[in-house]
Amino acid sequence: MSDNVRGYVKPGFEHVRDVFAQNFEKGEELGAGFAAIQDGEVLVDLQGGFADRAKKQIWDERTLVPIYSTTKAISAFVVAYVLSQSDRYSHESKMTEFWPEFGAAGKEALTIGDVLSHQGGLPGFKDEFDPSLWLDPVGLSAKLAETEPLWSPVPDGTSGYHPLTWGYLAGEIVRRIAGKSLGTVLAEVITGTAGDAPDIDFWIGTPESEHDRCADIQRPKELPELGPINDFKKAAFMTKWASPNRGGPEWRKTEIPSANGHGTAKSVAQLYAGFAQGGRIGETQFLDEESWEGLTRQRTFGPDRVLPFEIEFAAGVMRNSSEFYGPNHNSFGHSGWGGSAALGDPDLKLSAAYVMNRQSNKLQADPRGQRLFAALYDCI
């Protein structure tokens, strides 16, 4: 057993701690966390390794780490909450009802649900621009509104993953309907991080006051496994302008609801409990029946145009036909670049999250997290 593993496991869940320690013993981790919650009870909350590449700063229960696209399901939950508070809009509302400019270049028929399920044809930009625009969410959203889709924007039940642009679209939906940014709604209504005593230690738009807690990222040496390259993948991942400079203070502070949520394993599991408990997080029911159905029903299923997988998307969260998120097909989940992943299982009222700072080149099903999910279910 590694003496660098800390935290809590409920009696009967020691196997999860063993598997977590084995990931370190195999040399696969720098620092990491894993947490699981069932119907409000913490089953597992583990930390291990180091928060910095120099291996001087211990990864502890306060270490924050970016979870990249695992952020998307949390952001999708915020969008669903905002829609639940509106008497005008739902997931089936057209984007142009509140964002007229978005209808340019043939996008006028797209609904909120279409866009959040990666059917809008905007996975990236084929023409060069200054990548610093990614740090200006309103400006980048305006650019998306005027952009011609890379495929016909007629929803046909198949997706083309939007790795970064998704977050700007989700953020603009919230800004125009709620009059506040997505990260602000999350902080004020769900996590409590807008106050002095947050309930959930998670941020989209991480203030400088928290940056000293943020882990260093050790990037992978290999390129992501994208399969055969097409124009959609090039625009999404492979141009010089496909993303901003990641990891600096401006990137942390900017709200990018697709890619730069910062939290702990416990806080991510707390938020994914919303998918395990039918829209409830903690003691609060955030989603009514209509918004829950709009968030979680199947909208696409099949080979994705950008990722080399068959994916079943709801409105911003993945449905678990792949079994990447435990053995229950009724579960929901999402993964992030480098290995992070989280799930919500509504049948067991179980949520779990794996976070780390040594990235692999996996876009889905990183074996470290997969082992931990399997160990957790073995103990249930």
Image (cartoon, rainbow, N blue to C red):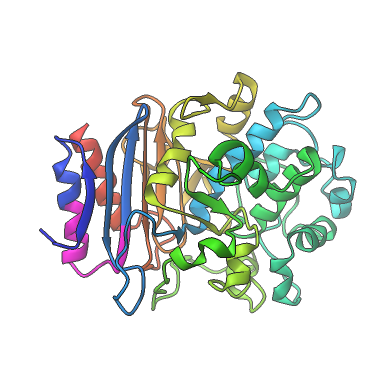
The magenta segment is 19-32
Is residue 131 visible in this depiction of the protein? Answer: yes
The quarter of the picture where the N terminus appears is bottom left
145 or 51: nearer the eye?
Answer: 51
Kindly indicate the quadrant of the structure image that contains residue 327.
top left
Q: Along the line of sight, which residue is nearer the eye, 48 or 192? A: 192
Quarter of the image where the C terminus is located: top left
Lateral position of residue 26 relative to residue 290, left or right = left
Q: Locate residue 194, reporting x and y percent.
A: 61, 46
- In the image, farthest residue toward the left: 1
Measured along the vertical axis of the image, is residue 144 above or below residue 82?
A: below
Residue 216 shown in magenta: no
Report whether residue 314 is seen: no
Q: Residue at x 75, y 38 (%)?
A: 111
Q: In this rendering, is residue 21 above or below 244?
A: above
Q: Position of 172 compared to 160: left or right?
A: right
Where is residue 54 drawn, in percent x and y?
32, 80
Q: Residue at x 46, y 62 (%)?
A: 337
